[in-house]
Image: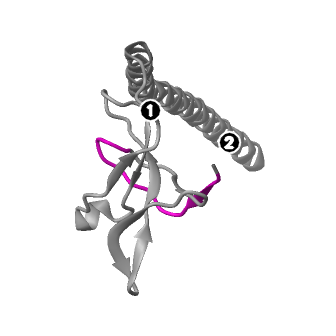
């Protein structure tokens, strides 16, 4: 069987975003037409709990036209395979959702540390600036005193 990628993607409970494929050796056609010709069905992947990872033929315009064309490409998978795939989906979702806030906290902490360092540097520079100003005033007073004497 030969599959070629088709541009575009789909997303729903039954198939979620991603690549659509065409079967060029055994094409299937839905009832949708473009320029008087029936459209070739595309191969998508189901991510429902009942059929995770199972491929099927479907209309590429199913979201817009609610076409009823549907035909399984893969045979049903075992209950054990369903359980394993669904558990992996849950783990992936937990992992991706738990990493984002942690990453944000780490970035916030880094930014906060930089702000604190800048405040400290600013305070040190302000103190140095006051000291330099005071030393200049004192030196000008000495110069003025010795110039007058």
Residue linked to disc 1: 75
Q: Residues within 10 Å of mark 2 (few under 14, many from 20)?
A: few
Q: Residue at x 63, y 42 (%)?
A: 137
- Choose between 63 and 102: the one closer to the eye: 63
- Which residue lies most toward the front here? 26
Q: Residue at x 40, y 29 (%)?
A: 76
- Choose between 126 and 39: the one closer to the eye: 39
Q: Are discs 2 and 1 less than 8 Å apart at CB? A: no
Give x and y (percent) for residue 92: 45, 24
- Gap in angstroms between the C-alphas marked 2 and 1: 88 Å
- Which residue lies most toward the bottom here? 35
In the image, residue 67 above or below residue 1: below
Residue range highlighted in magenta: 2-15
Give x and y (percent) for residue 115: 50, 33
In the image, residue 114 above or below residue 24: above
Give x and y (percent) for residue 79: 37, 15
State yes or no: residue 72 in magenta. Answer: no
Q: Is residue 126 left or right of residue 92?
A: right
- Choose between 51 and 89: the one closer to the eye: 51
Q: Predominant secondary structure in magenta?
A: loop
Q: Residue at x 32, y 33 (%)?
A: 48
Q: Residue at x 50, y 32 (%)?
A: 111
Q: Which mark is residue 136?
A: 2
Give x and y (percent) for residue 49: 31, 27
């Amino acid at each position: 069987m030969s599959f070629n990628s088709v541009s575009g993607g789909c997303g729903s409970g039954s198939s979620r975003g991603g690549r659509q494929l065409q079967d060029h050796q055994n094409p299937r056609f839905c009832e949708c037409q473009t320029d008087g010709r029936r459209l070739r069905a595309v191969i998508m992947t189901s991510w429902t709990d009942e059929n995770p990872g199972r491929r099927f033929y479907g209309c590429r315009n199913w979201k817009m036209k609610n076409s009823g064309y549907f035909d399984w490409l893969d045979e049903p998978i075992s209950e054990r395979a369903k359980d394993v795939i669904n558990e992996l989906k849950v783990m992936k979702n937990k992992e991706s959702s738990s990493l984002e806030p942690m990453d944000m906290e780490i970035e916030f902490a880094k930014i906060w540390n930089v702000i604190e360092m800048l405040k400290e540097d600013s305070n040190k520079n302000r103190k140095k600036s006051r000291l330099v100003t005071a030393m200049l005033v004192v030196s000008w007073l000495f110069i003025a005193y010795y110039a007058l004497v």
